[in-house]
Amino acid sequence: MRLRARLVIATVGVTVPMVVLLMWLDGRARHRAAAYALSEGTLRRLQNPDERARCEAAPATWGRPRRPFAAAGSTAGDGPGPDGTVRDRRPGGHRPPMPFPIGAPPVNYAYDEQLISVNPAAPRLAMADDVRTLEVGAVHVVPRAWYGDDVDVVVRTPWGSGPCAFVLTHGTTTPGFIGALLPASPIWLLPLAAVLIAILIAVGPVVARIRRLTVAVNRSAAHGFADAIPAEGTDEVAELARAFDAAGREVRAQLATKDQREQTLRDFLANTTHDVMIPLTVLQSHLATLREAHAAGAAPDPLVLTAAMAEAHYIGALLHNLAVAAKLDAGEPGMLKSPVDLNALVARVVSRHAPIARQRAIALEHAVPEHPLTAQADVTMLEQAVSNVVYNAIRHNRTGGHVALILEPQADERFRVRVIDDGPGIPPQQLERVAQRGQRGDAARSRAPDGQGLGLDIAHRVARLHGHQLTFAASEFGGLQVDLEGPTASETDPGPDADRDPDPVPAGNPSPPS
Amino acid sequence: MPDRILLIEDDQELGAQIVDNLRKAGFDPTWWRAGRHIEPQQLPGLALVILDLMLPTTYGMDILKELRASGAEVPVLVLSARNDTADKVRALKLGADDYMTKPFWPEELIERVRARMRRPTLQRGDALEVGKLRLDLATRGTHVDGAVVELTRVEFDLLSALARRPGVAVTRGWLVEHVLDPDREGNERTLDVHVSRLRKKLGVAVKVETVWGIGYRLGTEAA
Ligand SMILES: Nc1ncnc2c1ncn2[C@@H]1O[C@H](COP(=O)(O)OP(=O)(O)OP(=O)(O)O)[C@@H](O)[C@H]1O
Ligand SMILES: [Mg+2]
């Protein structure tokens, strides 16, 4: 339902019963007033001793109006009609006609003690019992409908006997437009109209503003909520407009975030492609060199072969890093924690890089505790973090160098993964910068040897996401020492690794059961 | 007799290479180019299953689940191209013993296969045997090539600690803490002295190797 129709219905629904109630109260009040006036008038008239004589002399005709009423526009009629009322029948016509119908003067009818009237015009009294028990000089008001203009009162005359023992006085309420129903003038319509007009005045602009707001919201929505929604004023409509504006801003912000994310993804894809293309090109070049050597009948250059393998290995590591970076960008939700067998993890990392280390004559050693350590972690992320540190130790090492990866339990249910090498290491002034990696959101990826790599950035971010500590120091062998520390998972923690394998040898760990 | 290995891998090129590498490494591979369930009668004599998770016909996980549901305990090494944690966790839950993510070097695969099939050290009752070395834990007697070798308490403890995990590096720190006499202020220096004495007593038949950055390991070459 439209707002206007709703308002009109509500207004009518409230005012009509109110008008009816008011008219009812008004009608009753006028009836009461008229009954009082009639009874007073009649009683005063009967005080006059002559009246008794006059009445008893001619009870059939006594009681006609003696003189025209000056008040209330009443005027003399030529007697009551058959129904006991006298309507406006001015026979004389010597008065100017009134602009609206008027009532009649009161008419009296005399009744004897048996409530029988000799006056042929007298109405029959129905409520005989009520009347007969009337005290001398008491008044009985004949009940009438409140909307009629007739008023009848029965009075017991002061003497209370004879043909004029009772007197019925018939009159009307103040004459009006339609009898007693409505006030004398249509002035009552005024407040009603005023209320309606007031409502329209108050509501009209509101409706118009709501319409304008609708248009503004639609327009804004059509432009992806790019336009602001104007909110003038301080009322509820303005509040609504402001709420729409705020909602629009929120939508705008979310759209912007989404666009940003899409852009990041596009950049990521572009960068990834770029990142992979370079080592791939290097690899192709190595392979071409080998092919040429073969064509020339020469033995393949082992250095080129090693370089080609290293490049292929690098591409693999890079792709794993990019995948983990994508998950890290998703934050917590990208992570899936489960109990991770750290011994097995170390074994996997070592076996992943062992072939490349062997190629470069780098000894890659590892040690794990006899009892496997377990930590709550995303196994892919943690493995990649450790793998990056180990791979660095191999890649940034010299031929014939050493790398050791040691997993050890620490006090307070913690583990430590330590990677040490005897390569060139990182000078102290740069160490701090390397240790601060991962604090920046965007990882600038390049293979330039200036500490801007992806590897440590991922190691840092994984450690932070897991609440692990990643620390860098100079190793006692001249190279770098990287420690990753974190809490171990409790033994009772039933993980996916639990009760699955009757074979007690941990993955990749050749140690016998203890 | 070479160990029988079942390879379930749908990629022709990769499958052929893995089969080739396994054969060169002395295994007896059987290659299934499509995923299908492993029947119980195919299990006897099978030392390992290498299962690719991304098989087109039957999802690798289903093969694994089916296999474990039938009660088979053959070790399963899962290969997955998707380096996805959920896949790994699920595979381990379903009873895989280990997994490898692509890409991998042939050497890496062979090493992992060997690691899965490595038998625990022979330990009969109170005796430890590694190659030519035999340790009697109850009597604390040491034999190399059948000959008795007299070892001190610390030397015996050191050797047995290494022999419990042959081929595995044990850190200096652990050895100092668990083998040396705490009353006599053992440190890594003392440990090295004990090791060099031990090496002299054992001769060339049993090798106590120094592991760079870590500690010592009992060589298994002679084994
Ligand atoms: N063990 C190490 N010895 C010497 N320098 C190292 C070592 N580890 C890291 N660095 C230095 O820190 C830098 C950052 O390492 P990071 O792993 O983040 O990048 P990267 O190895 O260059 O590239 P990538 O993204 O491929 O890993 C390296 O470029 C290297 O200069
Ligand atoms: Mg790196």
Image (cartoon, coloured by chain):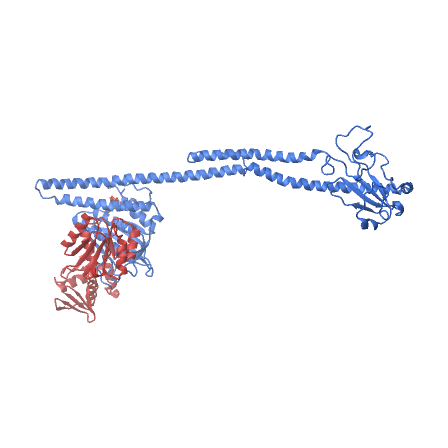
Chain colours: A blue, B red
Q: Nearer the viewer, residue A352 or B8?
A: B8
Left or right of residue A106, residue A253 in this image: left
- Counting from the top left corner in percent of width and height, residue B114 is at 19, 57
Left or right of residue A307, residue A237 in this image: right
For the C terminus of chain B, the quadrant is bottom left
Left or right of residue B57, residue A198 in this image: right
For the N terminus of chain B, the quadrant is bottom left
- Counting from the top left corner in percent of width and height, residue A433 is at 29, 44
User: Quadrant of residue A178 in the image?
Assistant: top right
Q: Residue at position x 64%, y 34% from top?
A: A194
Q: Nearer the viewer, residue B11 or A477?
A: B11
Q: Nearer the viewer, residue B44 or A407?
A: B44
Q: Is residue A290 above or below residue A466?
A: above
User: Quadrant of residue A503 in the image?
Assistant: bottom left
Q: Is residue B212 visible?
A: no
- Counting from the top left corner in percent of width and height, residue B20 is at 15, 52
Q: Is residue B127 above or below residue B21?
A: below
Q: Is residue A284 visible?
A: yes
Q: Nearer the viewer, residue A285 or B209?
A: A285
The number of numbered discs placed on residues in the rendered structure image is: 0
- Counting from the top left corner in percent of width and height, residue A111 is at 85, 45
Residue with the most extreme left position: A297
